[in-house]
Amino acid sequence: MRAETEKMQAAYFTQVGNTDEIEVGQLPVPSIGPADVLVRIREAAVNRVDAYVRSGAFKTPLQPQQIIGRDAWGTVAAVGAEVTAFHVGDRVWTNSMGYGGRQGITAQFATIPEARLFAMPDGDPSNWLALVHPGATAAIIVTQLLKLQPGQTLLAEGGAGHVGRMLIQCAKICGLHVIATANPRDFVAVTALGAEAIDYAPGWEKKLDRPVDAIIDSSGRVPLQLNLDQLAVGGQIILIAATKEPKVSFDLPRFYMNEQRLRGFVISRASLASLTQANQWLLQHAATFAPLTVEQLSLNDAAKAHAMVMDPQVKTRLLITLP
């Protein structure tokens, strides 16, 4: 337990809205329960879903003073009486705080349930933190949702993005053939990860020589029917982005006659069991993943970071360093 008068620096909001709702100031250091771990946070990641939570676009229970962020790494400062997996001084990470009624992690200290905490693998912790959000998204999709067999073909739309790059790597680990749409300037990076690259400009579908077994749309740029037209019988499309037009139409008779499937996925709806399975799979393959480009900001730049993460021109993974 920590004294109630002990304070920490944190970035938080008291009502949903624009980035100017984010305040940086002092809050009490949180206490811990029997199954909790108090972590001295070193860096917190900034994800688009964090901006959706702050803006109110993603509906979820919040604290009266909601600290922003869901992913962080740090060192264990104290453990609850029932905690067995971690000890003071351990380097740890989490990627499921800051929503569902749980307090966020962009603060000098955070109380995290033992079940939502993992030991840091070897290597640069900043690089690991940068990839765990897109990595867990990709791992759940590839290892739990698609159910493809080695040798089948996955089309990753937006293959040069953070999730796209992790999708390619996770799919290759599982023995899939991967085709990725991308800007030609990103072909070298995409092919280095093991994907066949095609230009995402209009007419990209003409470069496919056969239907694909699954499509992951992380770009939100492709009309649904155009994607369905490229899908094999029994194939599946998973949407993790949306087109600007919220209402779409498609050929329903052809869809069901071809036994195709369509689903949306957002990682913040994943169960703890699903997320834990994905995180353990990521840790198993940690040494194989190529690092993502990182940009580090200060705690005082929290509002700026929330604006940057929604800017499509910003290609780096944003991390906030805690003082």
Image: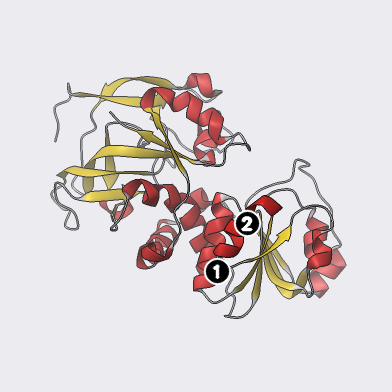
In three-dimensional space, the C-alpha distance between marks 2 and 1, rounded to whole angstroms, equals 12 Å
Q: Quadrant of residue 52?
A: top right
Q: Quadrant of the C terminus?
A: top left
Q: Residue at x 47, y 56 (%)?
A: 135
Front of the two marks 2 and 1: 2
Looking at the image, residue 59 lies above or below residue 209: above
Residue 66 appears at what percent x and percent y?
40, 29
Q: Residue at x 17, y 25 (%)?
A: 4
Looking at the image, residue 274 lies above or below residue 248: below
Q: Quadrant of the N terminus?
A: top left
Q: Quadrant of residue 13?
A: top left
- Inspect the image, locate mark 1, and give the three-letter code of the amino acid beneath it: Ala
Image mark for residue 149: none
Q: How many marks?
A: 2
- Inspect the image, locate mark 2, and give the three-letter code of the amino acid beneath it: Gly
Image mark for residue 159: 2
Nearest the camera: 100 or 214? 214
Provide the secondary structure element on which disc 2 rests.
loop
Image mark for residue 171: 1
Q: Residues within 10 Å of mark 1 (few under 14, many from 20)?
A: many
